[in-house]
Amino acid sequence: MSQFKNRHVLKKKELRAILEDIKTKFNIEIDKKSKIEEADFEGVKVIIIDDKVDFFVKGEKIFFTLPAIEKYKLRSNKVIVDMGAVKFVSNGADVMAPGIIKADRNIKAGDSVWICDEKYNKPLAVGEALMDGKTMENSSSGKAVKTLHYVGDRIWKICHT
């Protein structure tokens, strides 16, 4: 993992803030005994837990990496797309409202969300909600999710090395 710059263990104050943010946003408890580090990867701040890249930070918001969705068995903040949207989302396209079959009703615009397909329920992408969950389900036009991380991108590749 030499492609990281400024890799360091988080200080207690930073650690507490990040763990609280994760717990509040995703209802996930990270074991405090875990080795939790922060690093820069090609201009993206990443959070490394026990030598796995589990989160990245965009602006002031924290987002899951795709492998971490299954690792932590995330169930909230989920957006399900129809099979016709899979090819586009998997290649990094933003998620359009007409392709959405179902969305977590607790999603608010600006939230970190993950996108999966209707058939296999496999995580395809992570992004930022541009509308709330109910609007995503009921809207017949417009961009619903800004994609930030998807299968095969540079963050995905670093998670699989």
Image: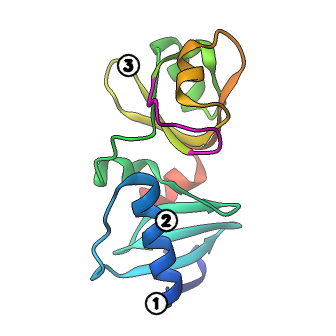
Q: Mark 1 points at which residue?
A: 12
Quadrant where the C terminus is found in the figure: bottom left
Magenta highlight range: 103-111
Q: Name the residue under label 2.
A: 21
Q: How crowded is mark 3: few (under 14 residues within 10 Å), some or many (20 or more)?
A: some
**C-alpha distance separating marks 1 and 2:** 14 Å
Disc nearer the start of the sequence (3/1): 1
Question: What's the CA distance linking mark 2 and mark 3?
Answer: 29 Å
The image shows residue 55 at horizontal and vertical percentages of 49, 61
Q: Where is residue 52 in the image (x, y as percent from the top left)?
A: 39, 67
Query: Residue at the location (27% across, 83% down)?
Result: 33
Q: Can residue 151 be seen in this view?
A: no
Pointer 3: what residue? 118
* SS under mark 1: helix
Mark nearer the viewer, 2 or 3: 2
Q: Could you tell me the amino acid type at mark 3? A: Glu
- Residue type at mark 2 is Asp
**What is the x, y in percent for residue 6?**
62, 85
128 in magenta = no
Crowd class of label 1 (few under 14; some 14 to 19; many from 20; radius 10 Å)? few
Residue 64 point in image, percent of width and height: 47, 54
- Could you give the CA–CA distance between mark 3 and mark 1, rounded to whole angstroms? 40 Å
Amino acid found under the numbered disc labelled 1: Lys
Query: What residue appears at the point 41 percent right and 79 percent down from the top-left corner?
Result: 36
Reply above or below: 39 against 57. below
Q: Which of marks 1 and 2 is nearer the N terminus?
A: 1
Q: Is the magenta stretch mostly helix, strand or loop?
A: loop
**Residue closest to the far bottom:** 11
